[in-house]
Image: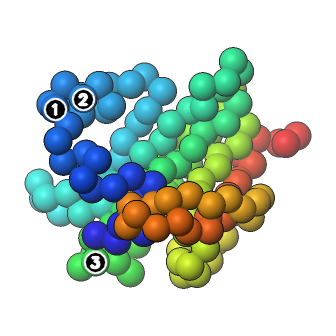
Amino acid sequence: MEPQAFCAQYSQWTHATDEQWQERQNNPQTSIFIARDGKVPIGMLGVHTDNDLNRTSAEIWGVYVTNRYRGKGIGRKLMEEAIAAISKMNEVMKIHLMVNAEQTGTIEFYKTLGFHRQGTTQLVLGDGKKHQLFIMEKNIKTGT
């Protein structure tokens, strides 16, 4: 795992109860996409519709593919499926995500999927250090 790629620290979630994990995945505003090799999870990403009144945007978070499976199109397939699912949500006009500014390959990957840099922010990531993040966005409906 690469803790600098995540906004939560591993230690924050190791003590979560089964109920907390179930509540997180059963949130109607959240979808989790998992790629598997047989029954073994090899990649994942989450989608959360924003909690604004109109739910006009969705956030992709927690994109991860295990090292062994990188470069094989798993991340692209996960992203394409998530974008397709979000596109079917009538009220959602755009998708946003945040990416560590140091992950240049990942930034370029997101650009190939139609995301563009919208801004920057700083957050303490999973490694416990403050990092610069790029906020990236993709419009999925015309007129935005």
Q: In 3D space, how far apart are the residues under numbered discs 3 and 1 (Cα atoms)?
A: 28 Å
Neighbours of disc 3 within 10 Å: few (<14), some (14-19), many (20+): few
* Quarter of the image where the C terminus is located: top right
Looking at the image, residue 17 lies above or below residue 69: above
Residue denoted by label 2: 20
Q: Which mark is residue 101?
A: none
In-front residue for pair 122/5: 122
Residue 18, x across and y down, in percent: 15, 31
91 lies left or right of 105: right
Residue 21, x across and y down, in percent: 24, 33
Residue drawn at x 56%, y 58% is 123
Disc 2 and disc 1 in contact, CB within 8 angstroms: yes
Neighbours of disc 1 within 10 Å: few (<14), some (14-19), many (20+): few
The amino acid beneath tag 3 is Asn
In-front residue for pair 131/52: 131
Q: In which image quadrant can residue 110 be found?
A: bottom right
11 lies left or right of 133: left
Residue drawn at x 48%, y 27% is 29
Q: Which of marks 3 and 1 is in front?
A: 1
Q: How is the image coloured?
A: rainbow
Identify the element where label 3 is drawn.
Answer: helix
Residue denoted by label 3: 67
Residue 45, x across and y down, in percent: 40, 52
Looking at the image, residue 114 lies above or below residue 93: below
Residue denoted by label 1: 17
